[in-house]
Image (cartoon, helix red, strand yellow):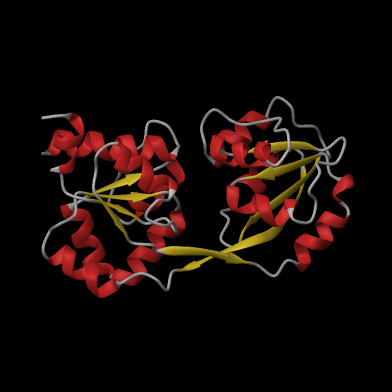
Amino acid sequence: MSVAEAAAELPPVVVTRAEASDGPLSSQLKSLGLRVLLWPAIEVTRADTSELAEALQRIDQFDWVVFASRHAVMPVLSQVPTRPAGLKVAAVGKATAQVLRQRGWEVDLVPEDSNAGALVTSFQIIAKEGMRVLYPASSRALPMIAKGLAQLGAVVTQVEAYRTDASVALDVADCRARIERNEIGAVTFASPSAVIELERALGAEHFQKLLTQAAPVAIGPTTARVLTELGRPPVLAESATLRGLADAALRFLQTRH
């Protein structure tokens, strides 16, 4: 039996990201031979861009712009298609950096680990007092980046670039039925918001039952912390990437079954 055939016999893996069946995480899981169930707990929508637009009108006043997610890229580049001279760019994660480079923006800083803490750590040796940083963020952005950079002496302007909301596409009845039948092998979480909204949608009882039966798998320490606070310490991806998340799910299922 091939590796792919063996993986296909494992229980399915849930994707809680907002993506289609051929989305980036689903594709990574399927490439490993795993079966995938889409349970979109969150959806990314357009934000009121007035605050962002005002900040971008004076983008030449900033020293750095920090992108913590690929979802923040297009709201900025749709208004500023060409990277201003003198502006340096930081990106959390190779996927975010790739989106920027594909659109002609060079990226000056990509931390080795794809998380907020690693970004702040990377700035420690280059931060200057009074450094002006623009941070286009999610409506639910955690304070780690803004606070961390401010503690290094930066003046951070955080503006909402996109919204992260509860998904209306999640079929809660089907999810609960699958939980009752104990069908799930692992549940992947790529953000704290996905954890929070899946618990809210399923209800605490079904959420706890799900993660008693199936392994929660977290992309990074921030997401892992939320799961741990809910009493479900997760399997943590070795690298904070979607590939790392997929690999962690496979490794767990292979050792469990």
Residue 95 visible, this orientation: yes
Residue 235 visible, this orientation: no
In front of the other: 167 or 78:
78
Q: Quadrant of the C terminus?
A: top left
Q: Horizontal and vertical percent for residue 89?
A: 73, 37
Q: What residue do we see at 77% from left, 65% from top?
A: 51
**From the viewer's perspective, is residue 155 above or below residue 108?**
below
Q: Horizontal and vertical percent for residue 84?
A: 85, 41
In front of the other: 131 or 26:
26
**From the viewer's perspective, is residue 215 above or below residue 54?**
above
Residue 174, image quadrant: bottom left
**From the viewer's perspective, is residue 110 above or below residue 200?**
above
Residue 16, image quadrant: bottom left
Q: Horizontal and vertical percent for residue 67?
A: 65, 45
Q: What residue do we see at 77% from left, 68% from top?
A: 50
In front of the other: 92 or 98:
98
Q: Horizontal and vertical percent for residue 159?
A: 71, 58
Q: Quadrant of the N terminus?
A: top left
Q: Is residue 132 left or right of residue 242?
A: right
Q: Is residue 4 left or right of residue 200?
A: left
How many marks are shown on the rendered structure?
A: 0
Q: Is residue 166 left or right of residue 214?
A: right
Q: Is residue 69 left or right of residue 103?
A: left
Q: Residue furthest top?
A: 125
